[in-house]
Image (spheres, rainbow, N blue to C red):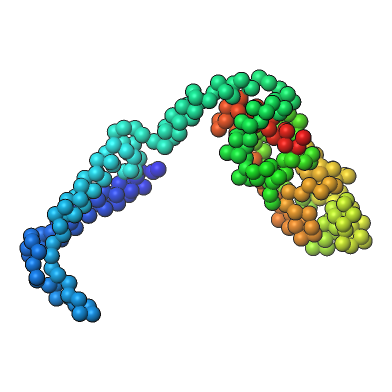
Amino acid sequence: MSTFWSIWVTVITLGTVFGCWWLLHATRKGQTSDTETDRTTGHSYDGIEELDNPLPKWWFYLFVATCIFGLIYLVLYPGLGNYQGLLGWSQHNQWQEEQQQAEDRYGELYARFGDTPVEELYQNKEAMQMGQRLFANNCSVCHGSAGRGNIGFPNLTDDAWQYGGDPDSILSTLRNGRQGAMPAMGTMPNMTTEQVDQVVNHVLSYSDRAEDPEAAKKGEQVYAQACAACHGPDGKGNQAIGAPNLTDDAWIYGSNYDWIKETVVNGRENMMPAQSGRLSDDQIQILAAYVYGLSR
């Protein structure tokens, strides 16, 4: 946070606390009596008159105590711009402490399986129970609780792997993450509407679903210019760069004409976050084995 915004936040925060303090005392001072009376403020609504009585003392002192508590809190904890507080507390430090506590408590459990090859580990029932919990906590939001994916997120239970389904590839994906990008119009930014229709039909023809066979045939040349560099001349994709296979029934963003046209025209971008730094090497080994086993 810049110095200006730090000062701005500090002034607003302290101004609010002291403003509440002043309002309490100003209101208290304006009272004409410290005890209950029958005197009214002169306001009346629907036959009900507003009495001019002070706040009960316990209520007043409770407000005062709240202001004092707020000031003490702001001295001890962050809350005034860049000021870190006398206790030096921060969310990041607390998170690190909790992570360390979890590592101290569960690290030995994970370490038991850390050196076991993925091909063996996925057959271990105890390890897979641990992997299922890791998957539920870290992966299910995108890939679903059963790993069957969703629009924009791959299905992990089939044999269609965008970056490879062997243990090393899965481990690499988990550790380092993936950044996928499908450029709009492929390598032909000036593609016409007619050419878009042709290339979409050509892609559909790989699975015998072309809506216009003639357009699909013409789209072969367009595909060769705009798409083949990544997806290959036969449409079977390239796992080295994460280009999906267009000839099977595994589609990340939908497989009908409209979905494919949307992908061709506007492109797609997606990211698989890296788990290194979030999970230990042993946890990643167990999670990789669980993912490896989903398709088996």
Q: How many marks?
A: 0
Q: Is residue 72 visible?
A: yes
Residue 176's spot in the image, x, y percent? 64, 33
Residue 172 seen in render: no
Residue at image position (17%, 56%) is 24
Picture residue at 53% right of the left edge, 25% below the top: 106
On screen, residue 30 versus residue 261, left or right, reads left
- Side of 8 relative to 28 (left or right): right
Residue 295 vertical position relative to residue 221 in the rendered view, above or below: above
The answer to whether 21 is drawn above or below residue 111 in the figure is below
Left or right: where 2 falls relative to 251: left
Viewer-proximal residue among 235 and 117? 117
Name the quadrant of the N terminus.
top left
Q: Specify the farthest residue to the front.
A: 125
The image quarter containing residue 290 is top right
- Residue 125 percent location from the top left of the image: 67, 28
Q: Which of 138 and 48 is in front in this view?
A: 48
Q: In which quarter of the image is the C terminus?
A: top right
Residue 218 falls in image quadrant? bottom right
Residue at the far bottom: name it: 46
Residue placed most toward the observer, 164 or 31: 31
Residue found 14% across the figure and 54% down from its top: 57
Which residue is found at the position 17% from the left and 72% from the top?
A: 50
Residue 138 picture location, percent across and down: 59, 38
Residue 200 located left or right of residue 65? right
